[in-house]
Amino acid sequence: MIIAKELLFYDKYLLTFKKLILGCIQIRPLRHQEFRMIKRTFLLSVTAFALVSCASTGPALRGADALPSSPQVWASGSDADPARIDNWVATFDDARLSQLINEAVIENPGILSAEARIRAARASARAANSGRLPGVSANLGVTQRESDAGGTTSYGAGLGVSWEADLWGRLAARAQAGVLEYQATDADYEGARLSVAGQVARAWFLLIEARLQTDLAERDVQTKERSLSIIERRFGAGVSRSSDVRTFRSALASSEAVLASRQRAQASAARSLEILLGRYPAGTIGHDSDLPEFTALSGIGAPGELLSRRPDLRAAEARLQAAGLQAEIARDALLPSLTLRGTLDTGGADAADIFDLDTYIAQAIGGLTAPIFQGGALRAERDRSEAAAEAQLAAYASTVLAAWREAEDAIYADSILAQRVEALRNAYEQAAEAEELVIRQYGSGLATVFELLDAQSRRIASEGQYISARRERATNRIDIYLAIGGSFEAPDLRDLES
């Protein structure tokens, strides 16, 4: 990974800087008084270190056993093959759907935002790791002094280097926490891709259902128009009553109202899909496909695989680890810190003196600093970080349990919805045959207009329910693949950025 390579880069230069500091210390030998002062300061620092180090560690996080172990198979009793599906979008056998998803994962504003957050998190990880490296600064100045005796000009330049030794691993923990946050943000992006793909698939099937329902409403209007024409002719011949005519005119008006509602729903579904694609919501997207037919469910894996497959669970795990590191950082803040500083100054009356080696003055200082009294701020931050880590642990357990529930619900619903689709298919076929029979009977005078109207209404209602059930099963299949963190093939903005 990019961040891992940068950490190796920083480690190499840390070693180089340590050699540099050791070399600077040897530039000028210490006088006896300076040695005694440093010795006294060192003894005081060690004493402070012994007093503070007793607070170095805190208790283990509570709630570590909040997550139950995962079973080997799904409790829903699915006979699914434990092997994974490599591309769940392809299981719908809809080339148009694949094209729409490919477009959405590049153009959807939410995807673009998630990708930008990855770049921001990557930069933050680099910044968090920078504390392990030395800080280098330079200065260049000109000083002009004026007096009664005349004026003088001096030139000076300096180079300063400072570095904090990572005695307790605090800086390394901060760098690792930055990397984990970057990994969590990267998993958030993958979750956004998966979510958008699922939303596009749902919106696509909702649009198909809306078109089929609109077609059904149009056929219903045409059927009632034909029936009304027959009834009006019978009324003209004195066979039917005027109430029959008015009844069917009312039924036709109701069907026309349903058609208008279906057309509105279809246009709204088209605009919803276009928004997901990052397009202007004109409601003009083509949608001539049919709802898919399904075989037995397979390739959904085992419950334990969700922890590594679902992006939201990977992100939650990374943030949990980062929270643990933040608690460690807060505990280490109670311990002393060792800082090494080196300066190199030069200058003189002439600008050329800046480059004169005889004017160089080098100094190296090491300081051990320990917090003595901060008004309880450091301990309060330690307690806050530990509590935040425990809260993150509980949130992670809750996320995992919710993920298992989503998967179990969707897997269980698949077989139930298959039974429902089959039952509604049979209901629709029987209603269609009954309608044909009543039409013939009405033409022979063996059925009333109310029986004809009832047969037509039953057929329309059963066919509409059958269409909705097919769409519902397609949506549930999408829910299954989202719940198990299914993979799919589509362009990736991270690859395009690279």
Image (cartoon, helix red, strand yellow):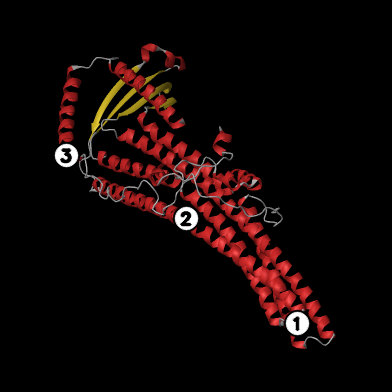
Residue visible at 20% across and 21% down? 34
Residue visible at 69% across and 57% down? 283
Q: Is residue 95 left or right of residue 149?
A: right
Q: Which mark is residue 244?
A: none
Q: Quadrant of residue 233?
A: bottom right
Residue at the spot of label 2: 410
Q: Is residue 418 above or below residue 448?
A: above
Residue at the spot of label 1: 445
> Residue 107 versus residue 72: which sits nearer the camera?
72
Q: Is residue 428 above or below residue 88?
A: below
Tell me the CA gap for discs 3 and 2. 52 Å
Q: Is residue 264 left or right of residue 108?
A: right
- Of labels 1 and 3, the one closer to you: 1
Q: Are marks 1 and 3 in contact (CB under 8 Å)?
A: no
Residue 437: percent from left, percent from top: 70, 73
Tell me the CA gap for discs 2 and 1. 50 Å
Q: Earlier in the sequence, mark 1 or mark 3?
A: 3
Residue at the spot of label 3: 54
